[in-house]
Image: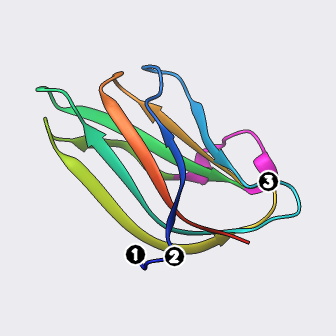
Amino acid sequence: MDSDTVILAQMTPPALTESLLYQVPSTQRAWVEGITVCNRSSNGQSFRISISLLGAPTTLKDYVYFDLPIQSNDTLLAELDFTMNTTDAIRIFASSVDLSFTLYGHRS
């Protein structure tokens, strides 16, 4: 991630509930560089991440991670490189309230 990278969104979602992490504001675009998932628990957990065009409801084709396990007290850094158009949405789902998500990138 370069020096112009900013935090686009952060969230500790409720357990077992799909939550909107980030939606590109209208008339803007976003370049996504990475996402971190931090497991603050002493137990293993799992998570899902989906990307939906134009903010459409999540369907099976939208998942980029589905029930991916994350070890206790571990952090996953997914380095990414893609552009999101206006109103595109990233949603998350966590098996526990002990997961934190941070999305990094640029807006234009």
Cβ atoms at labels 1 and 2 below 8 Å apart: no
Between residues 83 and 68, which one lies in front from this camera angle?
Answer: 83
Task: Tell me the number on the disc at residue 4.
Answer: 2
Does residue 54 sit above or below 27 in this rendering? above
**Chain part drawn in magenta:** 53-63
Between residues 4 and 58, which one lies in front from this camera angle?
Answer: 4
Q: CA separation, marks 3 and 2?
A: 19 Å
Q: CA separation, marks 1 and 3?
A: 22 Å
At label 2, counting other C-alpha atoms closer than 10 Å, the crowd grade (few under 14, some 14-19, many 20 or more) is few
Return the x and y of residue 108 as percentages of the image width and height: 74, 72
Q: Secondary structure at mark 3?
A: loop
Using residue 94 as the reference point, say whether residue 58 is left or right of it: right
Q: Quadrant of residue 70?
A: top left
Residue located 58% across and 31% down the image: 19
Which residue bears the numbered disc 3?
Answer: 25
Q: State the count of labels.
A: 3
Does residue 72 sit above or below 79 in this rendering? above
